[in-house]
Image (cartoon, rainbow, N blue to C red):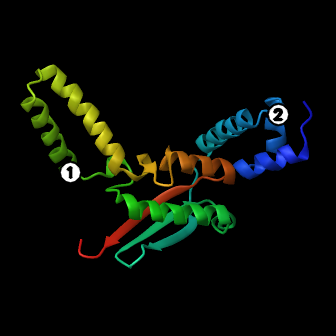
Amino acid sequence: MKITSQMVKDLRDKTAAGMMDCKKALGETDGDMEKAVDLLRQKGLAVAAKRAGRATSEGIIECYIHAGGKIGVIVELSCESDFVAKTDGFTEFARDLALHIAATNPVALTRDEVPEEIVKREKEIYVQQALDSGKPENIVEKMVSGKMDKFLAEICLLEQKFVKNPDFTIQELITDLIGKMGESISVKRFARFQVGA
């Protein structure tokens, strides 16, 4: 199949990948747009894995104030170069991330950062619920493990489903952005403020 410049443009619009990468992906998939998108995403994951250990000393601080001024978020999104930090895609992602934090109120960035007392309290509740339902001891542990896994995924920013597109977690979006930008990108920290909380 002949790969047209319009096909390349359409794929670039969908993925923000480079022109030559789009042309090559379309060539490898015989012009199948969906397969080409998947191929570019897979390559983005490979690039992200290679770049994961690199230092991220540049970036931006993005703020979001929810309508009415009752909720505010500050997030630090880091990358390797000032050039990437100034791109529209990077700043737009930082804005979306701040909006997401305002909406979901994550407790921590990763599971390692969740305060031990929260984990302990939640686990005790799940154990008691399972015991009260009359489940045997060996089943209780499996139930609690599954519930804890789900609970931690809901309160850790990187594991949360993105509010604008629940098909992806925040970490998957960051990985995708790394593939598009060609640099290591990470969320350094965030703070969420709410009036009266």
Instruction: Indicate which disc residue 138 carries.
Output: none
Nearer to us: label 2 or label 1: 2
Residue placed at 77% from the left, 49% from the top? 12
The residue under label 2 is 31
Which residue appears at 60% of the width and 64% of the height?
92
Q: Is residue 52 left or right of residue 89?
A: left
**Looking at the picture, how far across and down is residue 109, in whole percent?**
39, 54
Residue at image point 51% right, 55% down: 164
Query: What secondary structure is found at the residue carrying circle 2?
Result: loop
Q: Identify the residue under disc 1.
A: 118
Whole-angstrom CA distance, mark 2 to mark 1, is 51 Å
Viewer-nearest residue: 47 or 19: 19
Q: Quadrant of residue 56?
A: bottom right
Seen in the picture, residue 122 relative to 100 is either above or below; the reply is above
Q: Quadrant of the N terminus?
A: top right
Could you tell me which residue is drawn at 47 percent across and 65 percent down? Answer: 98
The residue lying toward the viewer, choosing from 57 and 38, is: 38
**Which image quadrant for residue 80?**
bottom right
Q: Is residue 86 above or below residue 129?
A: below
**In the image: residue 2, left or right of residue 122:** right
Task: Residue type at mark 2: give it.
Answer: Gly
